[in-house]
Image (cartoon, grey):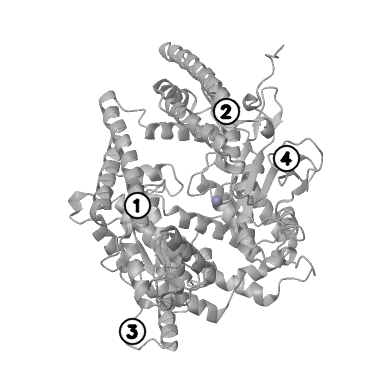
Amino acid sequence: MQNHQATPALLKGKGLPNYKEISPEEVNSQIPKLLKSLQKELATLETNLENTLNKDEPLKWDEVMNPLYQMGEKLRWSWGVISHLNGVCNSPELRNAYSAQQPEIVRFGNKLGQSKVIYNSLLKLKDSFSDTLDETQLRILEAELLSMKHRGVGLDAAQKNVFNANSEKLAELSNKFSNNVLDATSAWSLLLTDPSDVEGLPERVLSNLALNAKSAGDTSLGSDSLPPTKEKGPWRIGLDMPSYIPVITYSKNRHLREVIYKAHVSRASDGKLSNKSTIEEILLLRKEQSHLLGYKNWAEVSLASKMAKEISNVEKLLEELRSAAKPVAEKELEELQQCAYRHGDSDDNNLAPWDISFWSEKLRQEKFDLDQEKLRPWFPLPQVLNGLFSLCEKLFDIKIRPALEEGIPKWHQDVEFFRVFDQNNIEIASFYLDPYSRTGSKRGGAWMDECLIRSRADNGAMVLPVAYLVCNQTPPTENTPSLMSFEEVETLFHEFGHGLQHMLTTVNYPQAAGINNVEWDAVELPSQFMENWCLDRSTMNGIAKHWETGEQLPEKEFEKLCLSRTFNSGMATLRQIHFALADIRLHSQWDESLGITPDELRRKIAETTTVINPIKEDQFLCAFSHIFAGGYSAGYYSYKWSEVLSADAYSAFEEAGLEEKEIKSTGKRFRDTVLSLGGSRSPSEVFVSFRGRAPSTKALIRHLGLLHSS
Ligand code: ZN
């Protein structure tokens, strides 16, 4: 007889998931059941709330927020496991099950987020109890109200129709925008037959380009029509990054660089695939949406839920960085020019945009030839983890130990499980580490995700946070441990920073625990903060030891790593500021009444944010997918914003010096504020309570080497 009592692994809803028991079939059979029962719960909740609202009785937190959270958590737990497995143990069956169920998941989320009854109940809750709710509760409530408001829940029927139609249209336009970029990128390619065209390109690239030619059906010239080879060609280049970057960086053929550069910067700006009118349509529709929601422009909508709050704050921060970076960038350009002259470029030959990458690479090799591959033996994973854990022990007074007991559910044999203990040896959190790349079944990149969120269970017991830390680094071989590149080390530190915020939270409301409810432009603070330690010599001493000889990373190599951080950082910073300003101004200043096109507005911005003016073919906006097809609209500045926060936070440790006591007290303060308070306070307040003052751009400017002695 079947046991009808047993809960399927996918619907357990608490504790560590039993990964191995979750199959694609179960996804397809259990998720619809889960959604059905959640629909029912939602309907019941809405009826109950409506009754209370009609009776005009006050609403309590437990009556609204708890059932809402529990519904969301059931969905998050189950769907979270599936998304996780989809990322780390992919198979065609699982992928199909995932995409089959996803639309319904999204639909349910929308229904929840657009429920008028819930919205009114939250408003009522805020009205009735605003003086008895604590600060965290108020922040959770306000964030929820704002997110619902931005979904259009507060609009009347007529407005709502327009709003929803616009939203659909915007989704369509974003899709069109990104398809045009993709199509325009793949529509262009060029067959190279003369070996002098590819002089300077690394071998690895040549074999890829020969492969490209082969799959396009190209053969060698002449009567023998031989298949392409990396030595003899022909080679086919395109505008995709693996082809574009090496050609623009290494090709000694200046004319070829010019051709590919012009093709690249003019993508999707002409003919059938042109995004020019799409850009205007998107901007105008976003403006209309912002008016419907009661804002002046789209940038205001975006900033309403961010730490920066006001456009003027974004502009101010960017301007501080810009004015520091500009003169440095000009000097860097001059240095590149001199480098070109040294290597025989004629004197009247001014550098063009397609020369920058090429001469940068030359100069970089001249100044410090950092070969990341050669450094790997100094970064074996076990040693790197030791160093990372002892850094955390020193800074935050925690201990991290691998869990060696049997029976901890895992999804792959390479996965490790660690427990985190406080100074009194009491367990406070744990995490999974899935370090190695697995071609074919594991998504690329690295990320931190939530397995369990700190909260109080129904029986009053504390649920401790559990994090997923997923990297894609080089696997070990039979004879060697995983030998990491420096970049892989930085990535691990980065994700671990997110993990620390998730695990060291002391917030008991799960809606604001860890990374939850942290403003988007502040969420990279702990992660980038941790990255900074990779260039700290004493931390590095603990990490970088040759896996065979135990020898420390030579000083010379460490210096190269430090140099590579500031190399051409003036130009790199300026470029990011150019993008960020274009984004924020297009979304705050531009509309048809301005009398100029978005491109013209961008060119005005370029006057102060580039060292070589964009050429006329440069239609960069037509391929700026981050803001027109991704989630970064009026938010691109966040990259720089959070870098400023993390550099400034790190500088508190630099100021503390090497004194153990000072480091410990600064570390404790960081733990008690940034890592512990998460989304329970405004990020500005959290920052001030750590740093004793508002954030300053000074530390980042110094770290990037942008301080100039006039
Ligand atoms: Zn991150």
Pointer 4 with pointer 3, Cβ within 8 A? no
| Residue toward you, 33 or 199 | 199
Left or right, 63 with reference to 118: right
Q: Residue at x 25, y 53 (%)?
A: 276
- Are discs 4 and 2 less than 8 Å apart at CB? no
Q: Residues within 10 Å of mark 4 (few under 14, many from 20)?
A: many
Between marks 4 and 3, how big is the CA–CA gap? 63 Å
Q: Are marks 3 and 2 in contact (CB under 8 Å)?
A: no
Per the image, label 2 sits on a secondary structure element best described as helix
| C-alpha span from label 2 to label 1 | 34 Å
The residues tagged by marks 4 and 1 sit, at their Cα atoms, a distance apart of 50 Å
Q: Could you say which quadrant of the image residue 116 lies in?
A: top left
Q: Is residue 329 visible?
A: no
Foreground disc of the pair 3, 2: 2
Question: Which mark is drawn over residue 428?
Answer: 4
Q: On the rendered structure, is 692 left or right of 577?
A: right
Q: Is residue 2 visible?
A: yes
Q: Amino acid at mark 4?
A: Ile
> In the rendered structure, which disc, 2 or 1, sits on the residue that comes first in sequence?
2
Examine the rendered structure and indicate whether residue 580 appears above or below residue 90: below
Looking at the picture, which amino acid does disc 2 mark?
Val
Residue 532: quadrant of the picture: bottom right
Q: Residue 26: image x %, image y %?
A: 60, 26
Determine the secondary structure under disc 4.
strand
> Which label sits on residue 27?
2
- Disc with the residue nearer the chain's start (4 vs 1): 1
Q: What amino acid is at disc 3?
A: Asn
Q: Mark 3 and 1 residues: CB-CB less than 8 Å, in contact?
A: no
